[in-house]
């Protein structure tokens, strides 16, 4: 009996090893995964690197000042003479921008994680239901999904903010509502095609019930594109959310959030160009990291290339 | 047949496929000769390299294929040394091919009539002379005449003027004739139909018609009856037999079905693991198969005329072409394997009149 | 002779819908009135070309596709009217091997998992160690070994995958097996070994087979009695040698004549059918074969013949008796 368990584990391990081998050979995915890991680690340790109370420490004497001799922004920029160094300058509240960015990363990563996980969980469940059950249930779900597809994210966020107040949770819900329909369609498509495959018919002939077929066989075989989509979406969500913040939906103007930091920089673009540049760059790099990871994953998990 | 010059000669052709799993040593020194006006059937199971050989002849190999050595002589010239354009010209005129799935080789958005005419239009000179002959003689030129080139004004086409309309009409008439020749019911209607409206058997016959329309010297037929029903397969084979008498072409018939080969081929070449292991006339190879693989293959096929209680299977599996067995690739499964079989691949040698085998047993 | 399977006037029609409101404008009459019995322990062969309905018959018998009309009895139990629970029990006793070994196994399941799952569904074993032992037994039975237990389908060849499919079917101790083109995708030499295995298993485990194939030589090798299907109906049914060597229906005659023979010295007359294999959407009136039948008379275009027993055990659906040598119709 031990043999049995060992054997099964060994087989799955070998399969995993093969996946890792494929991952290693693809430079895209190596780059993407390294960068993504970097950001995740940073997100987890940010509060130890930088004291979070710095976010609420305002010192207006030091606002919009640049200190880093490496870049010369031009004559309109105020240089801070003092002993502290601000590698990326200061923001409107006199805080070190670099430290704020580091504090903002865990917030954005967490938000993106919740939204992506939530949207995919909801979308996958509904999509699986639609795909497997078919018929009128399918039709109904499709129409509801179509309605949600039509919602412009910004408008929905506006409505939410106006109705329920401007806080992070509400904004997350708004973005999630706009995001989940993609997963419905994705999952439904996968299920529809898996459903027709011969092994499903073979299982029915064996006497397997619907639940067993759906959860133990069809779902595991359909999940790969969803994983890829989730990874790609991660970057997209960060982009969308920070865009919302940038446009002014932020609950508090001093909140260390990438979009929010950039939003202040918009009004001071000539005196303090770093304020919009560096947060923006950070958003770009994070999005890029997860996009590369997602693309690489898609290449690796493509069943035609494996085997 | 006999000791005349072969029209196509493949000499020690070696070919690898470069895949991420390693080098697939698909062809291990293939020797093959195709003579004028004969039907040669290349028989083998999956992975033996029969389709690859055909693709190598017409240079339609996938990108990851590398030819490591050997020659493919067509009318004395090495095809491997020809440029892409030269090969394209050859494919258009002299070496025609028909494949297993006609749906993927026919343009789905063009009517059959258009596609068929297109083929005739490839050889404008011949068409022109046909048109002229028709005009002058006042009677329709049949496809059979067109095939055999019996047209009067062949050499004077450059000086003759013939309207585009006439040429088109001639092409159309020839198309109809061809379709009738391949026994398609209601050819007029077929010309106006799209490929998806036709059945598999009809599409296959259209493909054969299109292939022959070029009056090729060689027709390569790669598993053309595999996807067809038995009665349709019989029709297609019958068609090929009839055409073989009318057309001057040699046919290279690739199939995994020995029974089909027995029905239509003059000679049969058996392939295994990237080599030709035995070649002989059809009657000879069935009467006296010499290579152990051929023998065992024949015993594995159920026959309605000679039923047996138990079919004989061959021990082991088809060789792994990435890491193939050394020497003779059949030796791990061969009941007569000798020490020398493991060291060097046996060459194809003639051991009896028109009977070649690649085996150390028959030295 | 007791019939373990009895099929009575089985009909499976698929509706054709069209238009925005999806009106039913016609039916694909894939199986249109098929009746036959299979005796315990025999191999019943079912042949036919594309559109004949043989695959649909197989699926309708097992209710993988719900039949439109008719009845199927397995060992006395009415399969067509069985409840869910009864059907589950029936599914244990009636198994099927599919045509495509590359698609009929879940690519993410190990062999062991497949076999134990089959047993689990029907509550056959208790405990992991017993399941493991049984799985091993099954593998050895089909000619494979322990090391194969923990591999995934893609690591096996076509022939091996079919063996695994057989093992999986045997895991539930069936009495009856439908073999739907089990060797069509396999190489000749592999086909021989799989067919041998099937024959051995039949003897050892007293199984009854329905063997479906378009390869007439293989069906002849495997079967005891054979039925020929054309456009959804059985046109002839007889003991195999009677069917193959003295066919009575014109379609059967042409079918047998079309079989390529791996013997160049066998001279046979070339008898060809005109036209194409028809589609079950437009079934001709009268005898379905009449548009292509060289012996068709006026009666054939109007009246559909019944499957009648002509000689002992030899059933034919034709209005006439035909002497194929002379080509004459004898009424």
Image (spheres, coloured by chain):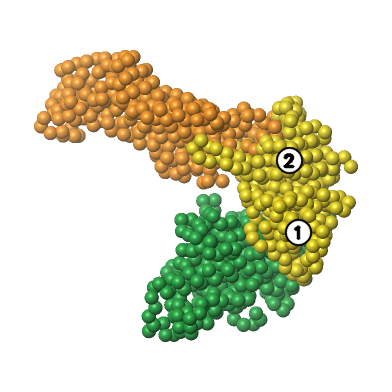
Chain colours: A orange, B green, C yellow
Report which residue position mark 1 lands on: C250
Residue C10 numbered tag: 2
Point 50% across, 30% down: residue: A139
Q: Quadrant of residue C61?
A: top right
Question: Where is C162 relative to B85, above or below?
Answer: above
Q: Quadrant of residue C249?
A: bottom right
Q: How many marks?
A: 2
Residue B93 location, x and y as percent?
A: 49, 72
- Are there few (<14), some (14-19), or many (20+) residues within 10 Å of tag 2? many
Figure quadrant of the N terminus of chain A: top right
Q: Is residue A23 left or right of residue A251?
A: right
Residue A133 location, x and y as percent?
A: 57, 30
Q: Quadrant of residue C187?
A: bottom right
Q: Is residue B159 left or right of residue B331?
A: left
* Label 1: element kind: helix
Question: Where is C147 relative to B308, above or below?
Answer: above
Residue A128 location, x and y as percent?
A: 53, 30
Q: Earlier in the sequence, mark 1 or mark 2?
A: 2
| Residue closest to the eye, A232 or B98 | B98
What is the chain identity of the residue bearing mark 1? Answer: C
- Are there few (<14), some (14-19), or many (20+) residues within 10 Å of tag 1? many
What is the chain identity of the residue bearing mark 2? Answer: C
**Alpha carbon distance from label 1 to label 2:** 24 Å
| Residue closest to the eye, C223 or A233 | C223
Point 59% across, 29% down: residue: A215
């Amino acid at each position: 009996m031990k043999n049995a368990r060992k054997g099964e584990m060994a087989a799955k391990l070998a399969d995993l090893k093969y996946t890792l081998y494929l991952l290693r050979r693809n430079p895209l995915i190596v780059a993407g995964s390294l960068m993504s890991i970097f950001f995740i680690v940073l997100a987890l340790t940010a509060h130890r690197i930088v004291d979070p109370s710095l976010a609420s420490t305002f010192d207006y004497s030091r606002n919009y000042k640049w200190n880093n001799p490496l870049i010369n922004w031009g004559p309109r920029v105020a240089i801070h003479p003092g002993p502290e160094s601000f590698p990326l300058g200061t923001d409107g509240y006199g805080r070190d921008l670099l430290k704020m960015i580091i504090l903002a990363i865990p917030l954005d990563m967490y938000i993106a994680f919740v939204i992506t996980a939530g949207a995919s969980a909801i979308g996958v469940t509904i999509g699986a239901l639609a795909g497997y059950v078919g018929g009128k249930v399918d039709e109904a779900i499709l129409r509801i999904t179509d309605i949600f597809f039509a919602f412009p994210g910004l408008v929905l966020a506006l409505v939410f903010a106006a109705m329920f107040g401007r806080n992070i949770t509400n904004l997350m819900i708004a973005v999630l509502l706009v995001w989940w329909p993609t997963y419905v369609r994705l999952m439904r498509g996968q299920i529809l095609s898996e459903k027709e495959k011969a092994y499903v018919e073979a299982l029915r002939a064996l006497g397997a019930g619907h639940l067993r077929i759906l959860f133990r066989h069809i779902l595991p075989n359909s999940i790969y594109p969803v994983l890829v989509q989730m990874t790609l979406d991660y970057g997209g969500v960060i982009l969308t959310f920070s865009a919302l913040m940038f446009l002014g939906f932020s609950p508090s103007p001093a909140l260390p959030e990438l979009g929010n930091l950039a939003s202040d920089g918009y009004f001071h673009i000539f005196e303090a160009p770093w304020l919009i540049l560096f947060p923006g760059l950070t958003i770009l790099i994070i999005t890029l990291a997860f996009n590369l990871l997602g693309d690489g994953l898609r290449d690796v998990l493509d069943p035609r290339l494996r085997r | 047949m006999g000791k005349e010059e072969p029209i196509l000669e493949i000499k020690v052709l070696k070919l690898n496929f470069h895949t991420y799993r390693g080098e697939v040593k698909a062809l291990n020194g293939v020797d093959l000769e195709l003579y004028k006006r004969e039907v040669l059937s290349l028989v083998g199971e999956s992975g033996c390299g029969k389709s690859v050989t055909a693709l190598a002849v017409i240079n339609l190999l996938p990108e990851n294929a590398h030819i490591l050595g050997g020659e493919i002589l067509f009318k004395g010239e090495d095809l491997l040394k020809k440029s892409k354009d030269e090969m394209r010209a050859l494919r258009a005129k002299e070496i025609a091919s028909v494949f297993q799935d006609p749906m993927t080789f026919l343009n789905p958005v063009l009517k059959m009539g258009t596609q068929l005419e297109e083929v005739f239009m490839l050889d404008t000179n011949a068409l022109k002379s046909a048109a002229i002959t028709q005009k002058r003689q006042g009677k329709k030129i049949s496809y059979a005449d067109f095939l055999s080139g019996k047209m009067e004004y062949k050499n004077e086409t450059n000086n003759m003027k013939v309207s585009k309309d006439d040429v088109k009409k001639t092409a159309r008439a020839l198309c109809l004739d061809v379709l009738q020749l391949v026994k398609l019911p209601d050819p007029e209607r077929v010309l106006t139909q799209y490929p998806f409206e036709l059945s598999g058997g009809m599409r296959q016959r259209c493909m054969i018609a299109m292939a022959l329309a070029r009056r090729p010297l060689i027709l390569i037929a790669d598993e053309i009856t595999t996807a067809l029903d038995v009665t349709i397969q019989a029709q297609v084979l019958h068609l090929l037999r009839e055409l073989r008498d009318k057309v001057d072409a040699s046919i290279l018939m690739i199939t995994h079905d020995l029974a089909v080969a027995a029905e239509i081929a003059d000679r049969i070449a058996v392939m295994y693991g990237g080599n030709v292991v035995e070649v002989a006339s059809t009657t000879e190879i069935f009467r006296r198969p010499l290579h152990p693989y051929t023998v065992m293959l024949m015993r594995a096929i159920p026959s309605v005329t000679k039923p047996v209680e138990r079919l004989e299977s061959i021990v082991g599996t088809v060789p792994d072409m990435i890491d193939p067995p050394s020497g003779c690739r059949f030796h791990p499964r061969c009941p007569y394997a000798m020490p020398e079989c493991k060291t060097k691949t046996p060459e194809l040698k003639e051991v009896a009149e028109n009977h070649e085998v690649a085996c150390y047993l028959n030295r | 002779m007791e019939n373990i399977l009895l099929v009575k006037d089985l009909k499976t029609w698929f509706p054709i819908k069209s238009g925005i409101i999806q009106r039913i404008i016609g039916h694909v009459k894939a199986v249109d009135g098929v009746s036959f019995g299979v005796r315990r322990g025999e191999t019943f062969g079912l042949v036919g070309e594309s559109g004949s309905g043989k695959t649909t018959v197989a699926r309708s018998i097992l209710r993988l596709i719900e039949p439109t009309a008719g009845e199927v009895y397995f060992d006395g139990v009415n399969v067509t009217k069985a409840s869910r629970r009864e059907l589950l029990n029936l599914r244990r006793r009636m198994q099927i091997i599919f045509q495509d070994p590359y698609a009929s196994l879940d690519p993410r399941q190990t062999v062991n998992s497949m076999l134990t799952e089959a047993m689990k569904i029907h509550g056959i074993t208790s405990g992991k160690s017993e399941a493991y032992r049984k799985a091993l037994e099954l593998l050895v039975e089909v000619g494979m070994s322990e090391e194969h237990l923990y591999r995934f389908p893609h690591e096996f060849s076509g022939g091996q995958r079919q063996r695994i499919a057989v093992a999986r079917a045997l895991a539930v101790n069936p009495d009856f097996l439908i073999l739907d083109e089990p060797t069509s995708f396999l190489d000749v030499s592999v086909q021989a070994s799989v067919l041998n295995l099937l024959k051995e298993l039949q003897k050892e485990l007293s199984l009854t087979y329905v063997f479906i194939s378009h390869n007439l030589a293989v069906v002849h090798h495997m079967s005891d009695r054979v039925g020929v299907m054309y456009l959804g109906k059985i046109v002839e049914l007889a003991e195999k040698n009677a069917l193959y060597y003295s066919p009575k229906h014109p379609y059967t005659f042409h079918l047998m004549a079309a079989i390529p023979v791996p013997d160049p010295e066998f001279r046979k007359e070339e008898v060809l059918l005109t036209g194409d294999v028809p589609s079950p959407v437009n079934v001709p009136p009268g005898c379905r074969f009449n548009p292509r039948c060289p012996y068709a008379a006026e009666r054939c275009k109007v009246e559909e013949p019944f499957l009648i027993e002509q000689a002992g055990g030899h059933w034919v659906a034709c209005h006439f008796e035909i002497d194929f040598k002379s080509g004459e119709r004898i009424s």
